[in-house]
Image: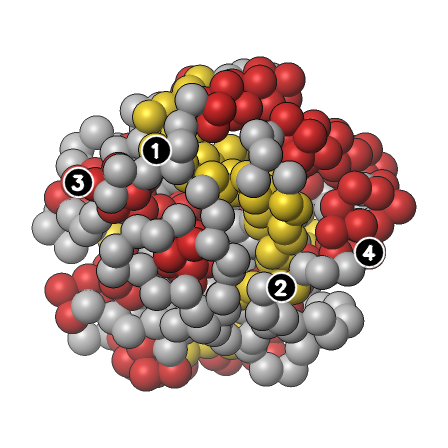
Amino acid sequence: MTTAGTDTEGLQADEPLLPGYGQTSLADLADSLLASLGVPGASNPLGLAAAPRVCLLLVDGLGWDLLRRHRSAAPFLAGLLETGCWLTAGFPTTTATSLGSLGTARPPGQHGMLGYQVRVPDTGHLLNELRWDNAVDPVGWQPGSTIFERAAAAGVGAIRVAARAFRESGLSVATMRGADYRAAETPGALVARTAAALAGERRALAMVYTGDLDATGHVFGCTSAAWRYQLGHVDRLAEQLAGALPAGAVLYVTADHGMVDVPPEQRTDADVVAELRRGVALLGGEARARHVYAEPGAAADVLASWRSVLGDTAWVVGRDEAIETGWFGPVDSRLADRIGDVIAAARGVSAVVATQTEPRESALVGMHGSLTPAEQRVPLLSYVM
Ligand SMILES: [Zn+2]
């Protein structure tokens, strides 16, 4: 495995940590996994070793910095850190976008899963890409192939193991269709169903998803005792998976993003500060990665007022600058109008909440979405059975 990065943590970076698209992003991991299984057309930017059967454990919210800081709560994963490295999630650092990158092996600007809430150009409404909306056809929204379709076409078993609720979700269909889905509601069931599925295949890619660590971090914070205890359960899950895989199989562990805790005094409320709503047609994204859609002709004014209000608490850029700087990777011109006219990515531990219009999200303790190392860096760990 190549070492994308092994340096120490850094929460308060002065510059955004831009995703390493084409080299060390989650899309590149997906492409490398296909290549390691011999799927035609896949390159192997991460240099993963050839393997007949591969299992990817996707731990929602397990940032590289968080794992390194809590080694003692996760002894099995800590042991894998010795040979592991960090990858960059992509932008924004949110589940829907990262699942798009992992599921399609393409960067956000190509697969079009561009945030937690994005404008649907045809209707002018916001689409919550995590929870979806039946009015939007997921295949029309993301028409490109998935890694499971490509694997299956090459005779490689394509398996997903996760909670039943995600089987037919819009996000699943958009980003991960084509897999043989094995529903599993508990950690024990995840392990048993993954092991059974892989045992039945000569060549296979299995993706296992667990979301409880992220959920715990959102409610209690990623610096809480609850988060550390939950990490212990993730560690046990990974260890059991490693022990249950057939000979010759490789277990990889990664995440969709990290997390930071946002204290109350670092929150700017877009439902209170009027300047953040002036000229704004739709407020999208999430608290640490805002897509701001301006009224016609108001984009420059919105950019100026967001910069003025947020100062050095966020990187605030216009759509063209975000695209040119490579926040989303190369952007398909047909997808560009899903991006906000203005994008605000939180620095440090700040956030732009909306307590009236987004009461549930605004109450969260742990958040993610931006370009800080704490959110952007995710682990890539491996274990060969
Ligand atoms: Zn989350």
Along the line of sight, which residue is nearer the eye, 3 or 115?
A: 3
Q: Residue at x 80, y 50 (%)?
A: 79
Residue type (three-letter) at the residue carrying disc 3 = Val
Name the element at disc 3: helix
Residue 274: x and y, percent? Answer: 45, 62
* Marks 3/4: CA–CA distance: 39 Å
* Marks 4/1: CA–CA distance: 36 Å
Q: For the C terminus, give its image quadrant.
A: top right
Q: Earlier in the sequence, mark 2 or mark 3?
A: 2
Residue type (three-letter) at the residue carrying disc 2 = Trp
Indicate which disc residue 157 carries: 1
Residue at image mark 3: 139
Q: Residue at x 59, y 82 (%)?
A: 15
Indicate which disc residue 86 carries: 2
Q: Earlier in the sequence, mark 1 or mark 2?
A: 2
Q: Earlier in the sequence, mark 2 or mark 4?
A: 4
Name the element at disc 1: strand
Q: Residue at x 31, y 60 (%)?
A: 42
Q: Earlier in the sequence, mark 3 or mark 4?
A: 4
Residue type (three-letter) at the residue carrying disc 4 = Arg
Decide if residue 263 is on the left or right side of residue 373. Answer: right
Which label sits in the foreground, 2 or 4?
A: 2
Residue at image mark 4: 69
Residue 194: x and y, percent? Answer: 51, 25
Residue 248: x and y, percent? Answer: 56, 40
Q: Earlier in the sequence, mark 1 or mark 3?
A: 3
Which label sits in the foreground, 2 or 3?
A: 2
Label 2: few (<14), some (14–19) or many (≥20) C-alpha neighbours in 10 Å: many
